[in-house]
Image (tube, rainbow, N blue to C red):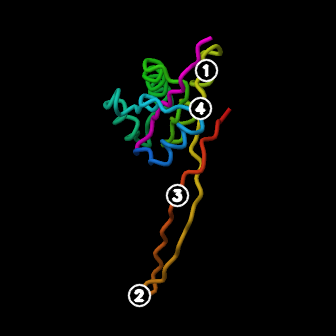
Amino acid sequence: MSTITPVLFVAFSHVLTQSQTDGFKAQYSTDNEGSIVTLKEVAPELQAQMSNIPATESLIHIQVLAMSILTEATKVGATHLYCTGEPTLMMWTNLYGYNTNPYKRLICVQSTTERKSVEVVNPDGSVTKTTTFDHVQWREMF
């Protein structure tokens, strides 16, 4: 019996934190260096499109973009998908990822965080708020 190596495909505008990377590897029992692949690595032009969706963009264009992201995830053998950012794109990418092939569904995940906020009253009376987000775990969406 062969085991499937978990591979997280990240379609995200930022870089994962070390705690997110370590958390995925621990939670899904893998230490494989190729266990996390980013859209930016495999399709930088698609990443650029994803990161700059105009507010006036059509739904059909966003749906096509979602399918293009999933095509890249499939090419690298992804088992898990982390897509976040523009809400409509995130929704369609995750829905398509889950529903496209019932025999090889992508496990759609989100990084859960604990938020710590500190507010400081400045000498001029204005308030500066600093929020730190610490990764807690990966949560499956469906």
Work out how far the residue at label 4 is from the one at label 1, CA to CA, in angstroms: 9 Å
Considering depth in this image, is 83 or 28 the residue closer to the camera?
28
Work out how far the residue at label 2 is from the one at label 1, CA to CA, in angstroms: 54 Å
Q: Which residue is mark 2?
A: 124
Q: Which residue is mark 4?
A: 108
Residue 81 x, y percent position in the rendering: 53, 31
Label 3: element kind: strand
Sequence-first tag of 2 and 4? 4
| C-beta proximity under 8 Å, tags 2 and 4 | no
Label 2: element kind: loop
Task: Name the residue type under label 1.
Answer: Arg
Q: Which residue is mark 3?
A: 133
Sequence-first tag of 3 and 4? 4
| C-beta proximity under 8 Å, tags 1 and 3 | no
Q: In which quarter of the view is residue 42 placed?
A: top left
Q: Is residue 110 left or right of residue 57?
A: right
Task: Name the residue type under label 4.
Answer: Cys
Task: Name the residue type under label 2.
Answer: Asp
Tell me the mark number nearer the camera, choosing from 2 and 1: 1
Secondary structure mostly seen in the magenta stretch: loop
How dense is the environment of label 2, judged by Cα within 10 Å: few (below 14), some, or many (20 and up)?
A: few
Q: Is residue 4 magenta?
A: yes
What is the number of the mark on residue 105? Answer: 1
Residues drawn in magenta: 1-13
Report the residue at 34% width, 27% height from top: 43
| C-beta proximity under 8 Å, tags 2 and 1 | no
Work out how far the residue at label 3 is from the one at label 4, CA to CA, in angstroms: 21 Å
Residue 110 x, y percent position in the rendering: 58, 41
Quarter of the picture containing the C terminus is: top right
How dense is the environment of label 3, judged by Cα within 10 Å: few (below 14), some, or many (20 and up)?
A: few
How dense is the environment of label 1, judged by Cα within 10 Å: few (below 14), some, or many (20 and up)?
A: some
Considering depth in this image, is 16 or 30 the residue closer to the camera?
30
